[in-house]
Image: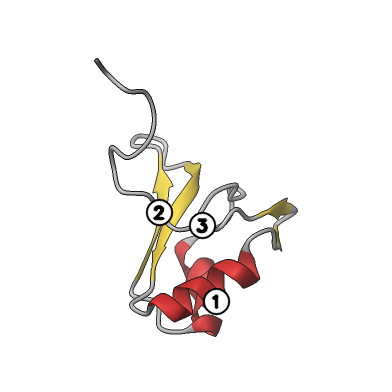
Amino acid sequence: MGNLAPETDETELTDLFKAFGQVKSVQVMRELFSGASKGFGFVEMPGKAHSLAAIAALDGKDLHGKPLRVNEAMARGSGGMRHR
């Protein structure tokens, strides 16, 4: 999930997503030294149907004046530049 406002925290995201099913884990990615949000994070839900319902309902939803970008996480190494 991306486009998180700096004040968005794990508790708020848990509350937002649990309306669609069980939330297994939530992590807002933060700068190592300052602890400031990097503007993206991850929410893990055990059920595929619940995850898809949350994505459909929350993608584009306004949170702290910013539209959330909610999508399925891609496996590491599946995007970006290709090395030859």
Cα separation, mark 3 vs mark 1, equals: 11 Å
Among the 4 quarters of the image, the one containing residue 27: bottom left
- How crowded pointer 2 is (Cα within 10 Å; few <14, some 14-19, many 20+) is rated as few
Cα separation, mark 1 vs mark 2, equals: 15 Å
Among the 4 quarters of the image, the one containing residue 24: bottom left
Task: Give yes or no for contact between labels 3 and 1 (Cβ–Cβ under 8 Å).
Answer: no
Residue at point 32% right, 23% down? 82
Residue 15, relative to residue 35: is it above or below?
below
Question: Which amino acid is tagged 1?
Answer: Ala
Coordinates of residue 72 in the picture (x, y in percent)? 44, 58
Label 2 sits on a secondary structure element that is: loop
The answer to which of marks 3 and 1 sits earlier in the sequence is: 1
Task: Give yes or no for contact between labels 2 and 3 (Cβ–Cβ under 8 Å).
Answer: yes
- How crowded pointer 3 is (Cα within 10 Å; few <14, some 14-19, many 20+) is rated as some
Residue 9, relative to residue 18: is it above or below?
above
Question: Which amino acid is tagged 2?
Answer: Ala
Coordinates of residue 43 in the picture (x, y in percent)? 42, 64
Q: Which residue is mark 2?
A: 73
Q: Which residue is mark 1?
A: 53
66 lies left or right of 49: right
Coordinates of residue 31 in the picture (x, y in percent)? 40, 37
Residue at point 51% right, 57% down? 71
- How crowded pointer 1 is (Cα within 10 Å; few <14, some 14-19, many 20+) is rated as some
Task: Name the mark on residue 71.
Answer: 3
24 lies left or right of 15: left
Cα separation, mark 2 vs mark 3, equals: 6 Å
68 lies left or right of 42: right
